Amino acid sequence: MADTGLQLRTRVNEDNTLTLWLEEQALPEPGADQVLIQVEAAPINPSDLALLFGPADMSTARVSGTPERPVVTADIPAEAMRMVQGRLGQALPAGNEGAGKVIAAGSSDAAQALLGRTVGAFGGEMFSQYRCVSAHACLPLNDDTSAIEGASCFVNPMTALGMVDTLHMEGHKALVHTAAASNLGQMLNRLCIKDGIPLVNIVRKPEQEALLLGQSATHVVNSEAENFHPELLAALDKTNATLAFDALGGGKLGSTILSSIEAVAARKMTEYSRYGSNTFKQLYIYGGLDMGPTVLSRNFGFAWSIGGWLLPLFLEKVGPQRGAELRERVAAEIKTTFASHYTRQVSLAEALSLEAITAYNRRATGEKFLVLPQA
Amino acid sequence: MADTGLQLRTRVNEDNTLTLWLEEQALPEPGADQVLIQVEAAPINPSDLALLFGPADMSTARVSGTPERPVVTADIPAEAMRMVQGRLGQALPAGNEGAGKVIAAGSSDAAQALLGRTVGAFGGEMFSQYRCVSAHACLPLNDDTSAIEGASCFVNPMTALGMVDTLHMEGHKALVHTAAASNLGQMLNRLCIKDGIPLVNIVRKPEQEALLLGQSATHVVNSEAENFHPELLAALDKTNATLAFDALGGGKLGSTILSSIEAVAARKMTEYSRYGSNTFKQLYIYGGLDMGPTVLSRNFGFAWSIGGWLLPLFLEKVGPQRGAELRERVAAEIKTTFASHYTRQVSLAEALSLEAITAYNRRATGEKFLVLPQA
């Protein structure tokens, strides 16, 4: 076993810059209830980008250092500095999830049981060669599952399952999803098909429409197409969807979904009400692909709610027992329902090349990088 | 007893106009469980205006008919007609609430118990000389309370009580209210003082600030003042308010309140989190004084929710038992906590004068009309 390992770090500096580099650090000793993972694979999720790059303008990025230890520096617009006062000067590790082999374990039974196993882990700092985590934060993969296959076993699978759990808990019958051709979206489509939940997939391009239809999706509508509104109304009418998960956040799409659900409900009302229908409409914003402001026209009555949705807050709400059940389902279906696909695999150093940064920071739907810290 | 009575009606016509007039109609016979109220006073609430005027441009209004039976006609912009297809051609009565004497009652005990009593009533059509309602929809006023004193016993008092109930049910400690110098706002201020609930009052004018401070409000901030942001942060910090009720709906104020609550919470965090604080922030939009779009900057983490809030939906949620308790409290405190003030009293015909319409359609904070259907 090595004595030290590399860890990707990100720091906001007083001089209005952001720095990314690989820090060499001593291997931590696992506590009684901890395990040390040799991280073999960690995906770059959209949710990692906010921490990695903050509000820096990555078009200004330049690289110094060596090929093995690149140092990336980018400028932060002066007016954006007040948003990151909370992390000023801190050398923060990143990487929400990943998988690897447990190479050392603390004395507890839970920790010892994982020794030698390949596990997935959630909880940050996975863009590292070695990572020490609580045994309870691990998702033990089945023996026939590799670290690469299990690298994305938390964020997307648990988010998809969390959306479906939210639907059941809050009494909805069908679901609307935006950016539906994303890795998560494709996964949610497979999950909803398997669980018999009607899903309205909203995409932005004809090829994304084709992709999902090719994956047996029943309702796919293109928000950029001319017939978007009638198509959306028809899909909502057929599915009775009253719950939507929006990955964009900004813009008017969320508002359009709510007013379309309301329009379908209003068509079924027998009496006019100036307050709109009693049909409760829920929109959750779980991402920020569109960083602009959310614009609500409020032409959807009074029976509505919009909220932030975040996996850790969801898991806190449902408790550890339900969390464990969901994790077991992920392990069982990691190669089918919850399989992830990557467009590129990179080493830690390659992840800091300007060309790679430009590619994964585009947040293009369907494009996904996998970091291999041991490469 | 008269055979007929006048009732104010509003209709959207196929020719892109809206008509308001007084319809003479036969007095209804109360059913077993109903009472007939001789309506003596009914306030014009902001919530009545949407039904009365719809999307009509009231600057185009003209009057025909006679002084006793005026007919008001106003144009509806063509593009707004699709919003009112649901009420096209229907002669709709209006008036959410009012009070008067029960002059006839059905055979049930509940109905007979109200005969001769002065009651408040909620449920529409109160801009009428006579109104037949379910006995259970009445709020019997105390003997020393006049119909004029009790005319506004539903919408504002129950809304103020509903806001405080919502605070308790959803686990918040303090409240933010916008348009806080309104009749409702002044009432909420008295209620919160009485019940010991910290309240942050947001107003738009210095004289409104003075008005509320003169009514013993502790926290009053002016959203148009230069020091609005620091003053709001200070008030949120002192009160720990995490719940806000917004009467405006449109614009950026709701978003500013959420981000300010988040900023106060973030200052108390010991560790940086890119997802923001865990402090749950709730904004309810209960009015539309600003009809423009709601604009959310989403710089307030993921632990937030924005929803519509409507008194009938609240009452449905808490059930009839709680509703009755709240009504009893209103009757007991109708001259103190729940007292309303009017800037003008008008007859049904006077309510349809262009000058009156212009005045009450301004929705100016603090300005309130009372219709006296028997005048």
Image (spheres, coloured by chain):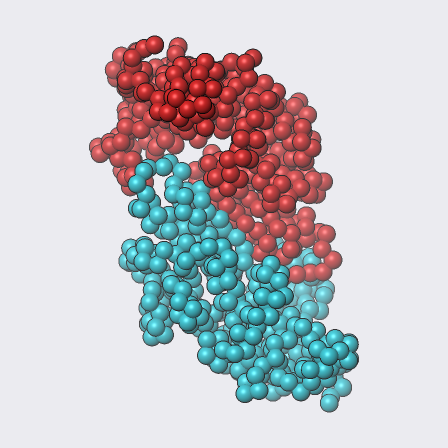
Chain colours: A cyan, B red
Please provide percent x and percent y for residue B363.
46, 27
On the image, which quarter does residue A206 sit in?
bottom left
Q: Residue at x 69, y 82 (%)?
A: A113
Nearest the viewer among A73 and A306 is A306
Q: Nearer the viewer, residue A371 or B145?
A: B145
Q: How many marks?
A: 0
Query: x%, y% of residue B67?
Result: 30, 11
**Residue A64 found in image quarter:** bottom right
Image position of A153 with respect to A117: above or below: above
Quarter placement of the C terminus of chain B: top left
Q: Which residue occupies the extreme left position in the image? A: B15
Is residue A325 visible in this depiction of the protein?
Answer: yes
Residue B18 falls in which quadrant of the image?
Answer: top left
The N terminus of chain B - image quarter: top left
**Residue drawn where x is 53% and y is 75% of the image:** A330
Above or below, A373 against B116 in this view is: below
Residue at 28% in and 39% down:
B85
